[in-house]
Amino acid sequence: MATYGGVLRRSSAVVERARDSVRSTRKALARFARPQSFAAPPHAEAAAVRAVRNIRSFRLHYALLLWLLLLASLFPRHRATMLFLMAASKLALLYGALLKAFPNSALLRRILDRRISAALALTVICAELVMTGAVLQFLLAMGIGVSLVLLHAVFRVRDDLTASGEETAAGTGGDPSPISEKKGDIEMGSR
């Protein structure tokens, strides 16, 4: 059989890449919502520190959750608005991909600044939501989503603090105080 200059590839490499992608996605989702990684903060200051750190760490997960909730709330009655929102998010992703592909581009960095582009996209999306009468669905989705994000951000404990505390306790015969106790570690409650 003639290949006409093309190289035949086995599908096993493609399948293996897809499996690796699925595994990494599963690991990220498991890390995001692992039940043993949740605990009540000892005081309000620790809750604020956790929330800021977790919002910084999981901002992509939180944005995806808010976006999916908004799309789900728009689905039954506002399909055109949902499609417009999806198109606007595709344009934002394209702009982000261009920034990643051309990091030293003067056009993308200076003329089309990220903040200006984000403000323009938000203005257009908000205007479209107002014109189609989908403000109530937007507020409902954001109210539910922001409360879920804040609950996750406040109660999610850092993995490295939990793991290091268990490892040092096992390594020192059950007395973790000499190694793991840090001054100013607000999150774990030690002062």
Image (spheres, helix red, strand yellow):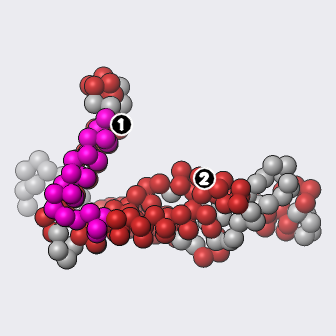
Measured from the top left, where is residue 57 in percent x and y? 54, 53
Q: Residue at x 69, y 70 (%)?
A: 40
Magenta range is 115-138
Residue 112 shows up from this direction: yes
Q: Residue at left 92%, top 66%?
A: 175
x, y percent for residue 187: 73, 58
Q: Is residue 87 visible?
A: no
Q: Is residue 102 above or below residue 106?
A: below
**Residue 180 is one of the magenta-drawn residues:** no
Q: Residue 115 carries which label?
A: 1
Q: In the rendered image, which quarter is residue 34 located in?
A: bottom right
Residue 28 position (above or below residue 3): below
Answer with left or right where residue 40 lies relative to residue 82: right
Secondary element under disc 2, as helix, strand or loop, is: helix
Helix, strand or loop for disc 1: helix
**Picture coordinates of residue 165, whole percent (x, y):** 79, 63
Q: How many other residues sit within 10 Å of disc 2, few (<14), some (14-19) or many (≥20)? A: some
Quarter of the image with the N terminus is bottom left
In the image, what residue occupies the spot 10% across and 54% down?
Answer: 3
Query: Taking 54 as reference, is 34 above or below it?
Result: below
Marks 2 and 1 in Cβ contact (< 8 Å): no
Question: Which quarter of the figure is the C terminus placed in?
Answer: bottom right
Q: Which residue is drawn at 46% across and 64% down?
A: 146
For discs 2 and 1, the disc positioned in front in the rendered view: 1
Q: In which quarter of the image is residue 180?
A: bottom right
Amino acid carrying label 2: it is Arg
